[in-house]
Image: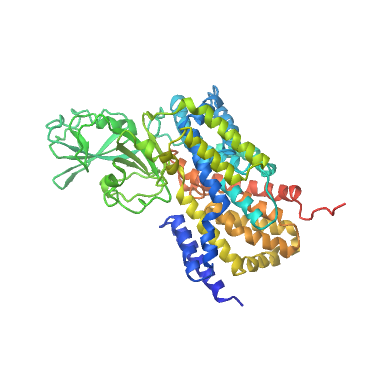
Amino acid sequence: MLGYDAWITLIVLAVVLVLLVRGRLPTDAILFGATVLLAATNVINVDEFIALPANEALVTIAALFVVAAAMRETGAIDRISRLMFGRARTELGFMMRLAPQTAILSAFLNNTAVVAMFQRLILDWCRRHGIAPSRLLMPLSYFAIMGGTCTLIGTSTNLVVGDLFHQAALAEVRFWEFAWVGVPFVLVGTLYVATVGRWLLPRRADLLQNIRESAREYLVEMRVGSDCTLIGKRVEEAGLRQLPGLFLVEIERNGRLIAPVRPDEMLLEQDRLTFTGIVESVVELERIPGLRPAELNLPENPQRRYCEAVVSYTSPLIGRTIRGANFRALYNAVVLAVHRSGERLSGRVGDIVLQPGDTLLLQTGPNFAAAHRNDADFYLVSGLEDARPVRHTRAWISFLALAALIWAMVSRQVPVPVAALLVAGTLIATRCISSSDARRSIQWNILLTLVGAFGLGKALENTHLARYAAEAVVSVTADYGPTATLAAVYFIAVILTELLTNAAAAVIVFPLAISAARALEVEPLPFGFAVAFAASSAFSTPIGYQTHMMVFGPGRYRYTDFVKIGVPLTILLGLIAIFLIPLIWPFHLPAPG
């Protein structure tokens, strides 16, 4: 019979899954809130609750965010990536250079930082060579995830699982130990993406034949001010039909809509003009004297900059209108236009209800991109002219710091959290990154998500639900041997990863996996490693991994694009993992002597 605390845990877990599927609340709020509730009902005692944030893996992950941000600040990643792509001229040639370079960097750096840097380079390369960015951005995300599986620090999942092994007194995971399966993941995954996946990848470049940097269709509203040079001119005479990639959808005049707009329609003072078009043409509108964003009357200011920001899956802006969120006061920026992949927006810009993956064209101060590019509210913030200063003279320091961190983790001469903190502190002290940027680079939502996941994992352990679930899995699969049980554990972790986050899924499934191994009376190591690799196999939905959401808007992808390409890849890598893991970490260790 299940006890009182077990029923509470089951109810909380069910509510968590429902809320995650509905997607109305941020993942970190759901998981952390669930852990607080479990502590309040004494399923987790006070000492266990207080100890959750002190986890070694969380400290290491926080420090690695700073290291990755410093590599970007000094232009170190930029230098590496420009050398990597050589003189690729074809889509396949570029992809085959992209795969190993992305995988190698992601093995040592946070893959979010790697994707953010390479995304800009890919868009620029696509613009020059007339290739749709949708052909390369999804592979970029996939390569980064697979590369992260190769080392202990490549992904937060590996760090978390390594720490769980340590806490359970099962093993001390070595730096390169994951590479036994991670490298085959990269090789087979690259082959799949370059052949079958490349055939399934969409071509989304229908706005212009020659790809622009973003190739996104924005909705933008402009108001004809009293000093506007367009007053009294017809639409065609004003040149509003000659801007490439721009379409005048409607005119609002004294509460009355004029649509469709005729070429001979006269423009009057206070008319609100709604356009859809590419970013270059939207920016061009602002150069017309007296034509300003409809929502706000902005004075001329030569210090203003244009930036693009992609709304993150955990942003507090989700579900709120731009006007209702008080965007200008919150971020000191004005939303000029909004793009949503696969959908033509209508109505007033200020009334648009924001969704994850929406791309916002912003008018900002000169330091907005630097201040917010590590903000958890956005997946990507980039200035259109990319004029932010880079500390190039300190790139060599960040290279040395990264090398020192890798040496410390491989040699085990210094505890991993201490080494990561020392390197992060050195980068701040040598001004490779400012202390304020270092603080902003830490993705607190991810850390809170992990704290919440650790809490749920502790509840599953305290109530013995992990053991009961493991016994159920074993009872179904035991007749087919430990490999069948391993496969069941692997795909349970895969499914949870698509619903939660990769590290959170690992924390929750890990105790189930170890309990299953003990029930079978076999070595638990292969089951723990199965959880690690399964939790890094989130290829099937755009919400399964944060790098997918980073490329979702810029690549103009649809949900089904990830399903049809990612599901076969997930199954393929799963079969490889299930085959290799028992060979590398056997179910039965050889007898001593």
Q: Is residue 330 left or right of residue 491?
A: left
Give whichever of 593, 363 is nearer the camera.
593
The quadrant in which residue 307 appears is: top left
Residue 445, percent across and down?
Answer: 45, 51
The quadrant in which residue 142 appears is: top right
Give whichever of 505, 456 is nearer the camera.
456
Colour scheme in the image? Answer: rainbow
Residue 140, percent across and down?
Answer: 53, 37
Q: Is residue 248 left or right of residue 40?
A: left
Residue 138 in view of the camera: no
Q: Residue at x 55, y 40 (%)?
A: 422
Q: Is residue 47 above or below residue 440?
A: below
Quadrant containing the N terminus in the rendered view: bottom right
Give whichever of 175, 193 is nearer the camera.
175
Q: Is residue 440 left or right of residue 499?
A: left
Residue 164, percent across and down?
Answer: 63, 55
Q: Residue at x 56, y 36 (%)?
A: 198
- Seen as rendered, the residue at the extreme front is 429
The count of marks equals 0
- Seen as rendered, the residue at the extreme top is 87
- Seen as rendered, the residue at the extreme right is 593
